[in-house]
Image: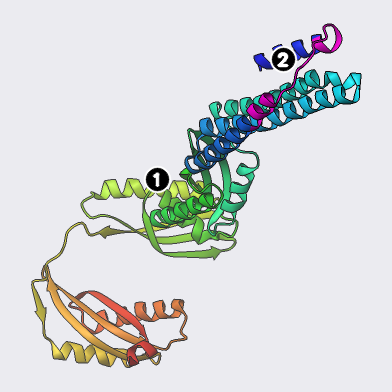
Amino acid sequence: MLTCAWIVYEAMLRLFFRHIEIEPSAAAFAVMLFAMGIDWWRSRVLGRIASKYDSQALEADALHFSTDIWSGGVVVVGLLLVMAGRAYRVDWLRDADPVAALFVAGAVISVSWRLARRTVDALLDAAPAGVRSQIQDAVSRVDGVLEVDRVRIRRAGNRYFADLTVGLARNVTFQRSGQLATAVTEAVHRVLPDADVTVQPLPRPQRSENIFDRIRAVATEKNLNVHDISVQDLSGRLHVEQHIELDERMSLKQAHDQVTELEADMRRDVPEISGILTHIESEPATIEMPEELVSDAELVRRLKTVAAEFPEILDVHEFVVKRVRGRMYVSCHCTLSDDLSLARVHDIQTELEIRFKQAAPQLFRVLIHPEPSTDNRR
């Protein structure tokens, strides 16, 4: 650009203050045409390699040589116009050479400005125009993403780096969160194929959450597992009953304090709740070794008789009776109709477990596995 400033200055002098006769020759045209051919070949090769390796330096050099082609063409036209002015005695055409110099300077200034802007953008980590909105649109279409909170894109060398913060449902599992992060990364790669992508998930409540989801979300936030949640509406006031599993090695005081803190958080986050009753269960921390498998045909017969009292139960089978730490355990498979609701299946299991323990008081634990009738036929 400094050279262009000097060219512009010299051209203006020759146009208005100091006339200089130009002597075009065949050698001048031969040199210009030869140089334009070399520049065309070099710009083409450099452009191909710059595209292959995404190199800004090589791309700038390719643009430099392509600019030389157009500049050389303007010079050739200027010399031809000078020759035409002499041949046809047109005085103003004799100034075609400094005018051509002004065109060359203008072209170089334009290209230099474009290169400078692109280089400054690269040094300042600027992203290509429109890419951020394209990434936002692509990521927002990923199933499971509730919102795109932030998208930051920068370029370092020939690579792009994209940092995204996305909102996911707060009750998704850690494994599901990882799957969604992978899907978000793939969406970004559809816009920037070679980008290095970092995805940060944020938990967000869903509009479709019911009170059960909200209760579980509070427990999940504390890395606790609640189940068998029951909510009753007592004269317009909601009462919650739930089961929670805690490490069996904890003392009662420790477990009770943790549950008290959990219940306080639930009342704060779900203000509709007026009362909570939590049943504390021990979560096994050791692998149990059964002392023996018990063969008790009379016990199995009694349990089958009890199961026959339930009209929805089509069959019970695969009874396993064992003794663990001096206590009797029994498990069995229970065949039910395919179209029974899960709520009804749970009620039947619970009632059957109670009846089994009534018929055989020595039983400490009963586990019933429900099966659909079609599966049992296979």
Identity of the residue furthest to the left in this view? 291
Mark sitting on residue 183: none
Image quadrant containing the N terminus = top right
Element assignment for label 1 = helix
In front here: 332 or 258? 332
Identity of the residue furthest to the top in this view? 17
Kindly report the distance in space between the C-alpha atoms of the residues bearing marks 2 and 1.
80 Å
| Residue 377: quadrant of the picture | bottom left
Q: Position of residue 207 (x, y in %)?
A: 60, 56
Q: Is residue 306 left or right of residue 29?
A: left
Q: Position of residue 151 (x, y in %)?
A: 56, 41
Q: Mark 1 points at which residue?
A: 261
Q: Can residue 153 be seen in the rendering of this structure?
A: no
Q: Which residue lies at the image location 78% right of the left edge and 25% below the top edge?
A: 78
21, above or below 359, in the image: above
User: Disc 2 marks which amino acid?
Assistant: Ile
Mark 2–mark 1 CB contact (< 8 Å): no
Is residue 27 rendered magenta in the image?
yes
| Residue 121: quadrant of the picture | top right
353, above or below 21, in the image: below
| Stretch in magenta | 14-33
Q: Is residue 242 left or right of residue 166?
A: left
In front here: 81 or 178? 81
Is residue 329 rendered magenta in the image?
no
| Residue 87: quadrant of the picture | top right
Image quadrant containing the C terminus = bottom left
Q: Which residue lies at the image location 22% right of the left edge and 59% below the top edge?
A: 284
Q: Name the residue under label 2.
A: 7
User: Disc 1 marks which amino acid?
Assistant: Glu
In front here: 91 or 253? 91
Q: Is residue 364 left or right of residue 343?
A: left
